[in-house]
Image (spheres, grey):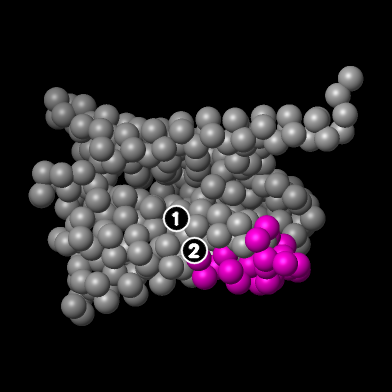
């Protein structure tokens, strides 16, 4: 019979194996969405974005349910996923090239979705039989859809712009690569530096916001910031044609903004979960947690990255 210590060690090992497996799979999919030949890259991006959207919406509905906000969880998740599929098909031109009617089909689907949303809400209220609970669920669901879809649309914008630029230069989608890696490296760097500093420093490191996220420390934040800036400078030398890292000063500013955006997104999820009394957003991704845990930092960095890009285009 195993002791408690042995059981705890085994649980940690199992969690590490699951986390490693999930990380490898996610990196493979992410790499395929960037480096795979056309149209495989677009198909992978479609599948990845659709599955993550479905899981993300369900998780947010689950969290807000603990805040007393009932939603039409499945309907909202399917609606958002359908919209993401439609955007992918339209902008990445995934309908067969030999189809003479692909633009017409895309337009018809867009109009069906547009008018379905425009008429669906009022008609639902009309036939709700004065049910206040159903009407509340409708507006709660609409709020979740908007909250979730806005950052996703910014992410799509970055991917589509990067895809267009990659076609011109006949190389991979380096803009999307820069965006995602600058976002995630801050998380990883802060976690590693924070964990190591907590073990090495007598009495532990200095906590940043223990009431919101007990694991975050000033030492980890400093380490994550430095690592993000260094990576941004590295991208400047690798992709000098990319405006967001077009010079060393711009690369440094981009790195700083992306790190603090990433940290803000992570803290946003922590605040939401703590307010709802929920420990984890989900268990969709083995060893990592929920989809929200994976993409929370993108909620802030996606609009920030888009703003940087637009600023450099119009004012640089």
Q: Residue at (11%, 44%) from the top-left corner? A: 170
Q: Quadrant of the N terminus?
A: top right
Residue 309 placement, left or right of 8: left
Residue 232 placement (x, y as % from top left): 32, 63
Out of 87 and 4, give the one closest to the viewer: 4
Q: Which residues are magenta?
A: 199-223
Residue 107 placement (x, y as % from top left): 28, 42
Residue 209 placement (x, y as % from top left): 69, 71
Residue 242 placement, left or right of 22: left
Out of 109 and 173, give the one closest to the viewer: 173
Out of 34 and 203, give the one closest to the viewer: 203
Earlier in the chain: of badge 2 and badge 1, it is 1
Residue 131 is covered by the magenta coloring: no
In this view, 63 is above or below 309: above
Pointers 2 and 1 in contact (CB under 8 A)? yes
Tag on residue 224? 2
Q: Secondary structure at mark 1?
A: helix
Q: Residue at (88%, 29%) from the top-left corner? A: 3
Provide the residue designation for mark 1: 185
Q: Quadrant of residue 204?
A: bottom right
């Amino acid at each position: 019979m195993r002791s408690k210590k042995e059981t705890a060690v085994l649980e940690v090992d199992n969690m590490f194996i699951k986390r490693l497996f999930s990380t490898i799979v996610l990196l493979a999919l992410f790499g395929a969405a960037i480096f795979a030949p056309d149209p495989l890259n677009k198909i992978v991006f479609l599948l990845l974005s659709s599955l993550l959207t479905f899981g993300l919406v369900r998780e947010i509905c689950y969290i807000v349910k603990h805040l007393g906000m009932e939603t039409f969880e499945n309907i909202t998740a399917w609606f958002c996923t359908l919209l993401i599929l439609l955007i992918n098909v339209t902008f990445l031109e995934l309908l067969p090239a030999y189809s003479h009617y692909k633009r017409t089909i895309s337009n018809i689907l867009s109009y069906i979705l547009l008018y379905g949303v425009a008429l669906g809400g009022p008609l639902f209220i009309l036939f709700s039989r004065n049910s206040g609970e159903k009407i509340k669920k409708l507006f709660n669901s609409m709020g979740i859809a908007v909250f979730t879809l806005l950052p996703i649309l910014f992410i799509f914008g970055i991917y589509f712009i990067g895809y267009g630029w990659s076609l011109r230069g006949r190389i991979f989608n380096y803009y999307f690569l820069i965006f995602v890696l600058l976002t995630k490296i801050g998380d990883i760097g802060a976690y590693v530096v924070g964990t190591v500093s907590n073990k090495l420093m007598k009495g532990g490191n200095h906590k940043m916001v223990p009431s919101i996220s007990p694991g975050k420390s000033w030492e980890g934040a400093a380490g994550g910031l430095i690592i993000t800036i260094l990576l941004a400078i590295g991208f400047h030398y690798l992709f000098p044609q990319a405006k967001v890292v077009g010079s060393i000063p711009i690369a440094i500013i981009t790195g700083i903004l992306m790190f603090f955006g990433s940290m803000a997104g992570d803290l946003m999820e922590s605040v939401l979960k703590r307010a709802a009394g929920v420990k984890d957003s989900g268990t969709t991704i083995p060893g990592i947690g929920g989809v929200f845990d994976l993409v929370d930092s993108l909620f802030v960095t996606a609009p920030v990255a888009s703003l940087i890009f637009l600023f450099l285009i119009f004012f640089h």
